[in-house]
Image: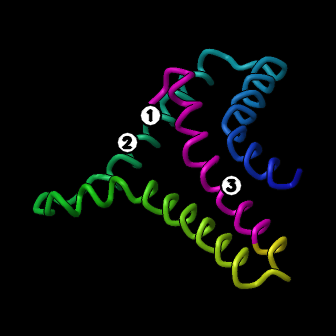
Amino acid sequence: MGTLLTMILPAFAAPIADGIKALTRKYAGVSVDDEIKLLTANTDKLKALAELDKPADNISPWVANLRASFRYICAGVIVLAAIASGIYSMVCVPELRAAVCSAFLELAGAAFSFVFGERMYLRLTGQK
């Protein structure tokens, strides 16, 4: 049950945050001026993030591609490490089998769910 929760909860972090925002706006009330200020702040935030994420002008293409895929590489390494440690503990360390497998499956599940769950939610809501 614990492993299932560590896989599901990170995936629902973005929808829960959106729901809390919607409820807060509904009950607290947001004026048009406040909404415009929020949109302006979000736009400035996205511009700043894009500026931070923009590679240098004379960067090699393979370095730029590596930077862009870093999140997926890290998630893949975590999932592969969980698989390898699970196989190792199943074969070589039977007395630690349950604890090691559980810990690494929770780690892999959380990483996988956060990385790909957030992307899936953004795709479903029409955001990028």
Distance CA(mark 3)–CA(mark 1): 29 Å
| Residue at the outermost right position | 1
Q: Label 1, on which residue?
A: 43
Q: Label 2, on which residue?
A: 47
Neighbour tally class for label 2: few under 14, some 14-19, many 20 plus, Cα within 10 Å: few
- Residues at discs 1 and 2 in contact (Cβ within 8 Å): yes
* Circle nearer the viewer, 3 or 1: 3
Q: Residue at x 75, y 34 (%)?
A: 16
Front-most of 1 and 39?
Answer: 1
Sooner in the amino-acid sequence: mark 3 or mark 1: 1
Residue 3's spot in the image, x, y percent?
Answer: 80, 54
Q: Which mark is residue 110?
A: 3
- Element on which disc 3 rests: helix
Q: Residue at x 40, y 59 (%)?
A: 70
Front-most of 81 and 19?
Answer: 81
Question: Where are the magenta residues, as a range?
Answer: 101-128
